[in-house]
Image (tube, helix red, strand yellow):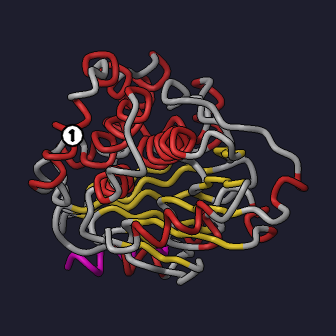
Amino acid sequence: MQEARDIYEMCQNYSTIIIQRHVNPDEDALGSQLGLKDILQRAFPEKRIYAVGKNSDRYGWIGTMDQIEDDVYQDALVIILDCGSLERIDDERYQKARQIIKIDHHPAVDRYGNIQAVYPDASSVSELIADLVNDLPDQLSFSKEAASALYAGIIGDTGRFLYPATSQRTFEVASQLLSYQIDLATIGRKDEEITPAVAKLMGNMLAHLEVDDCGAAYYIITQDLLTSLGLKAEDAGDVVAMPGQLTTVKAWLLFVEDETGKYRVHLRSKGPKINQLALKHHGGGHELASGATVEDLDEVHVMIKELKELLQ
């Protein structure tokens, strides 16, 4: 990472460092965030270093967030991970910071930060954090805890090394993290565990998934369905990849209604690029895996129509 030295020197200049990431965090967002926190704490034991954002019920096994007051942001450095757009940053208090560092692997939607380390070809931000450490071996180091968090982030964002962004470098980093005696079996089990309620959601999706002749598929998860199963919107993340297992599906949309009536959209594809479709609906992301937000059912159906047109 060519910005490694600049990132380290900026961290040296601040007594308070706050690490943030995107809303509705996945394993990479949390793994990179908590891994970096541990790495910086080892390098700068005299500094105040926090990981901020809402806790995740689904991925709480990776770690928990810090609760801090507004005044902690005064004269602080904020490092924002895994977030290409400003509107998706979890906790708007980042705006109170003195300076911002952005580390990301999504194609840039918003260009923000005094330092921007953006590498769209990387498998994950967790891989980038490992690269940061490896670029500064005399200043930064891994612990077992950091290695565990980063490994969780890598397997989460690569689909256990199956997604296209997985590279030779990804395997090299994963091998290095394994050398810290992390509990590979437990991490893998936690990654794939689902609750009985999520299993019922999977069954419902397979029964009601709509698949067009062109290979466009979609599924709508309403608040009523989530409530009936005792689930939260974030639990839907466990079913996002399933439509891709069907031979007839080329690209798909998963709509998850939140408590306000808006829909969080998960876009996935086996080949056709769908990130431009996400950008049209207050989102963005990778060419084959993106996210968006739509206001209501009318916009849901507009997006379905646009996906079909994209695949025809």
Mark 1 neighbour density, 10 Å: few (under 14) some (14–19) many (20 or more) = many
Is 310 covered by the magenta stretch?
A: yes
Amino acid found under the numbered disc labelled 1: Ala
Q: Nearer the viewer, residue 144 or 191?
A: 144
**Rendered view: 232 above or below 222:** above
**Rendered view: 246 above or below 9:** above
Q: Is residue 248 visible?
A: yes
Q: Is residue 304 visible?
A: no
Where residue 35 appears, as percent x and y from the top left, is: 46, 41
Q: The magenta stretch spans which residues? A: 301-312
* Residue at image location 20% in from the left, 38% down from the top: 176
* Residue at image location 32% in from the left, 51% down from the top: 137
**Rendered view: 249 above or below 199:** below
- Number of numbered discs visible in the structure rendering: 1
Where residue 169 appears, as percent x and y from the top left, is: 15, 55
Q: Quadrant of the C terminus?
A: bottom left
- Name the main secondary structure of what is drawn in magenta: helix
Residue wearing tag 1: 174
SS assignment at label 1 = helix
Q: Please tell me in which quadrant of the rendered image residue 188 appears.
A: top left
Q: Is residue 120 left or right of residue 85?
A: left
Where residue 27 appears, as percent x and y from the top left, is: 43, 41
* Residue at image location 38% in from the left, 26% down from the top: 144
